[in-house]
Image (tube, helix red, strand yellow):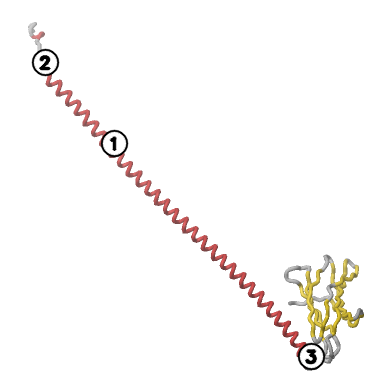
Amino acid sequence: MSSLAKHIIHQPKPYRSVLMVIIAVFAGFLIQWWISCTDNEEFQALKSKSAQLEQVAQDKQQQAQIFEQENNSLQTHLIQQRSEIAIQQATIEQLQLNLAELQQSQLLQDKDLLFYQSITQGQTSSKLQIKELKLYQDTEASDLIRYRLVITQGKKINKPIQGSIRMVLSIDNNGTIEQQKLESHDLNLRHVRVLEGQIKLNENALPISIKVTLVQNKKTTLTREFKWQLSPK
């Protein structure tokens, strides 16, 4: 090989270098554009998925609110119904109580009417009588007893009988017989007089009898004793 071949000098090619730089830059731009597009598609997909999840959460929240409102409305309706039922039951009970009281009052009036009828028909004597004594348990207080005393007089009288009715309760207090004075009643009687009142029993006291006395001009003119016995209303 000659020495001339080793020392060949090539001519410089500047366009090739520029072209290679342009290709490299363009390739880099394409790579960045592809990466940007890929990232943008993933971002949009994620954004869409996030929006869907958010919408689902909002729908569930709205459903929960609707359910809570319906539940509250139902509870309010149930409370109103229970209140109305309670009011109706209380009204029915009160009406039943009023009816029982009216029936009892009617019985008492019928009884008084029988007395008046017997008097006007001349079926009783002209003598004053302590006719009957009824004792009833008070419905609200267990230590209270209500009484109803009936006094009658025949039709052959010239003027009303006046005086006072005194009542004494005999009780057994742990083996000891004691006397308990009850309230007195003024008497102005022509035919029939009904006296009512109440008796308050002492604790551990056992009632035995009630003595009813008519006092006129400070003298006892009539006495009758009734055994202690409660009557049904």
Q: Which residue corresponds to the image point at 83% horizontal and 87% vertical from the top-left?
A: 153
Decide which of tag 1 and tag 3 comes sooner along the chain: 1
**What is the distance, in whole Å, between disc 2 and disc 1 at their CAs?**
43 Å
Amino acid on which disc 1 is placed: Asp
**What is the distance, in whole Å, between disc 1 and disc 3 at their CAs?**
118 Å
Residue 26: percent from the left, percent from the top? 19, 28
Front residue (pair 121, 34): 121
Amino acid on which disc 3 is placed: Ile
Q: Are marks 1 and 3 in contact (CB under 8 Å)?
A: no
Residue 178: percent from the left, percent from the top? 90, 69
Q: Pointer 3: what residue?
A: 119
Decide which of tag 2 and tag 1 comes sooner along the chain: 2
| Secondary element type, mark 1 | helix
Q: Pointer 2: what residue?
A: 12
Amino acid on which disc 2 is placed: Pro
Q: Pointer 1: what residue?
A: 39
Q: Are marks 2 and 3 in contact (CB under 8 Å)?
A: no
